[in-house]
Amino acid sequence: MWKGFEDLLVNYVNAMLREWARRGKKNDMLRPGDAVLGLQERPSPRVPPWLGEELLHACHRDALMAKLPEHYGQFGWAETGSAYDGSYLWPEEKEDGSWVLRWPKAAKRPEHPIGVGADTLSVAHAADADDTLTARGQRKRRRAEEQATPDRADLVAEWEHLTKAVLPKLASAQRWPIRFDHCFQRVALDAAFEGCWYDHLDRKKGAAIKQITVDDLERAVRAARRMEVEGIAAVRALDDASLRHRGKAPKKRMKTA
């Protein structure tokens, strides 16, 4: 969707980084204008035709509301998450140069030409335009609703599995800078609190996992998932941030030829 519009994407990323810094947050991965990362801004970049298409953005807002209503609900969006069934609309350029919004092929729903009445359709109407939701779609919706209010026991189980089994195994095989379960727990907990976790929990009262709220635990689990999915790059970034929270310098890395 961004092919041919990379310059605008760079400007967007830089704008997000500047806003992040304006809020007093630390940027440990990217820096605006870093030539090595290719983030030099260009004036007057091309704008994709799908930008501002209300149906597209409403669909994605609905997905966000379904996944994390306690966070996104504060923004006052009209979407409630009820129309989300696991499928997303995406812009696609056709062979003739025109653009459409399309659902995944498996959804078997019609495309919507961009700029032709798309803004008059609701997400729910677009989702049901071809037929009523399939049983598969309804199951996805129920799962999304259940995931919006995660069960503490499930989160604890996933936390234990990721930090004590999955991540140490990956670390050993891929030579990550941290390898032990307590290291991954430190990094993920610090990421959840955006600071040293024991500034927020009392270590004298027992293990963090027994004191932490469901919301904070969910954020910690997301950090652990990120390390599993993104690998050493995420591990380094989160570990460096954790060390800074504790007044320590990030680990030195071996130079490669």
Image (cartoon, grey):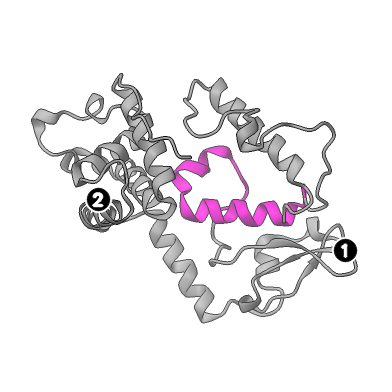
Disc on the earlier residue, 1 or 2: 1
Q: Which residue is at a point 89% across and 63% down the rendered structure image?
A: 97
Q: Position of residue 81 (x, y in %)?
A: 54, 56
Q: Amino acid at mark 2?
A: Thr
Q: Which residue is at a point 55% across and 23% down the rendered structure image?
A: 21
Label 2 neighbourhood size at 10 Å, few (<14), some (14-19), many (20+)? many
Which type of secondary structure does the marked residue at label 1 adopt? loop
Q: Amino acid at mark 1?
A: Ser
Of the pair 65 and 217, the residue shown nearer to us: 217
Residue 163's disc is 2
Please state the extent of the stretch shown in magenta in the rendering: 51-80
User: Residue 54 magenta-drawn?
Assistant: yes
Question: Quadrant location of residue 239?
Answer: top left
Of the pair 199 and 143, the residue shown nearer to us: 199
Label 1 neighbourhood size at 10 Å, few (<14), some (14-19), many (20+)? few
Does 120 appear above or below 106?
Answer: above
Closer mark to the observer between disc 1 and disc 2: 2
Q: Which residue is at a point 47% across and 30% down the rendered structure image?
A: 28
Q: Position of residue 122 (x, y in %)?
A: 71, 60
Which type of secondary structure does the marked residue at label 2 adopt? helix
* Residue sitting farthest toward the right: 96
* Residue corresponding to mark 1: 98
